[in-house]
Image (spheres, rainbow, N blue to C red):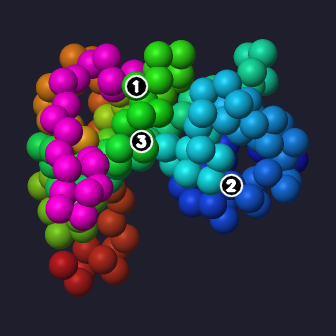
Amino acid sequence: EHALVFNVSNPESVEVARSKSPKFSAAMTWLHQSFGVVPDWPGFDILTLDPREPTSIGRMIELKSSGVASRFQEMTWNEWKTARSSTLRERFYLYLVGNLRSDLMSAQPYIRTIRNPFEQIAAAVQVSRTTQRKVQLAVSEFQEAEHLDLMVQHSEKTALNG
């Protein structure tokens, strides 16, 4: 009921959050009625609420991860439509998490946070043969991003087994 961070990556998670949090339900209704955000598939993975904001919406976070430091990431057309919404742009964040493969001992895992990715990058829209539209993002072309290297701690057992 008092949660401020919600998984909205699938309809089941959205429904559970709606049933347990009136604030979440109100925020999703506002996003749908005011901006046409699809309630079951809002176009981002995580919604944070900010009790200091009149609408309660904090961040709309799209999370992309990769086992390596990918040069390109893809967003679905639905994700991109939400990111480009002129009124929501300042609240939309793209979190890129990379170097997650455990066999890359010399590669430092990281999180790169990009606020308002639509304004920061020129993206190429590609249409696949199954008529799915995806937006390909050249990760190195973002003008501004917060970058945080992560530390991986290996247990003694893992270190001994290689």
Residue at (78%, 16%) from the top-left corner? 54
Question: Which of the two discs, 3 and 2, labels the residue nearer the N terminus?
Answer: 2
What numbered label is drawn on residue 14?
Answer: 2
Image coordinates for residue 31, horizontal then vertical, percent: 66, 31
The span picked out in magenta is 115-134
CB-based contact (under 8 Å), mark 3 and mark 1: no
Classify mark 1: residues with Cα within 10 Å, few (<14), some (14-19) or many (20+): some
Residue 109 vs residue 162, the one in the foreground:
109
CB-based contact (under 8 Å), mark 3 and mark 2: no
Q: Which residue is mark 1?
A: 84
Q: Is residue 49 above or below residue 16?
A: above
Q: Which residue is mark 3?
A: 79
Q: Is residue 81 above or below residue 102?
A: above
Image coordinates for residue 116, horizontal then vertical, percent: 39, 22
Question: Which of the two discs, 3 and 1, labels the residue nearer the N terminus?
Answer: 3
Q: Which amino acid, mark 2?
A: Val
The stretch drawn in magenta includes residue 34: no
Q: Secondary structure at mark 3?
A: helix
- Measure the C-alpha gap from mark 1 to mark 2: 22 Å
